Image: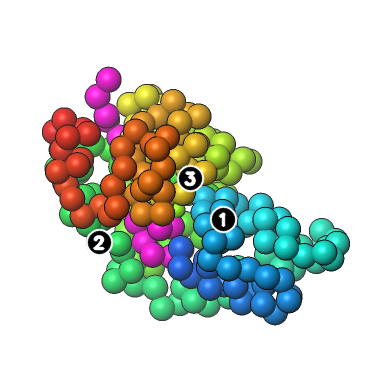
Amino acid sequence: MSIKAVIFDLDGVVVSTDEYHYRAWKKMADEEGVYFDRSINERLRGISRTESLEIILEKSNKKYSSDEKLKMTEKKNNIYKQLLNELTSNDILDGVIDLLIYLKEHNIKIAIGSSSKNTKMILSKIGLENYFDKVADGNEIKNSKPDPEVFLLAANKLGIKAEECLIVEDADSGVEAALAGNMKVLAVGSASNNIKADYRIKTLENLNVFKKIMKI
Ligand code: BG6
Ligand code: MG
């Protein structure tokens, strides 16, 4: 079956916001006195804000009320949004723009499938708010990755069957989500060693990989 659409994860695939997620969680955790490091951060890729906090709090002996947890996620999001103030098109990851142009030229539909509730704001800051055919994000789903919900929603909005979509992901949870949704998946960056993915690549700079996958 040929690929008719490419659905991109946002953070860590299109734009380098993954580093800002880390810094914001780190600041929140430090202020709460909870141990947090980059290896724990890897487990948060693709995971919703509230589920991320639960993973971080595994390192704490303290019991937090749901109100305290809500305050912590709000605090993290405020720090994160402050860091995003400086976000511009310079933060778009290498190879992304050339790839998007190439896919459009070949009449392949493009969409975003992200767990982030900040998706629209980020797309606007990097100047890509009107670039994708459809956007599905964390505001529209009940279950975040590894559940396939956000990708199935994006495919549905595009009007393309799941098996005709290629997902591009930097998170192991996103690779799982794509496979659970019966979609093909290209793992990049942090997920580029994931052997479950159909295809793997370090960065999106090499268009030849896409030419082979898409047969275009
Ligand atoms: C994903 C990130 O894209 O979005 C996760 O990989 C993040 O790290 C999740 O927790 C939710 O993001 P936000 O912006 O809604 O807090
Ligand atoms: Mg990601």
- Distance Cα–Cα, label 2 vs label 3: 21 Å
Q: Residues within 10 Å of mark 3 (few under 14, many from 20)?
A: many
Q: Is residue 97 visible?
A: no
Q: Which residue is mark 1?
A: 44
Q: Which residue does the numbered mark 3 point to in the structure image?
A: 172
Report the magenta residues as a range: 1-17
In the rendered image, the vertical position of residue 132 relative to residue 71, given as above or below: above
Q: Position of residue 33 (x, y in %)?
A: 73, 76
Quadrant holding the N terminus: top left
Alpha carbon distance from label 1 to label 3: 10 Å
Q: Quadrant of the C terminus?
A: top left
Q: Secondary structure at mark 3?
A: helix
Respond yes or no on whether mark 1 lies under 8 Å from ligand 1: yes
Front disc: 2 or 3: 3
Q: In the rendered structure, are the residues bearing label 1 and label 2 in contact, judged by CB atoms less than 8 Å apart?
A: no
> Image height check: is 46 above or below 17?
above
Residue 92 appears left or right of 33: left
Instruction: State the mark number for residue 94.
Output: 2
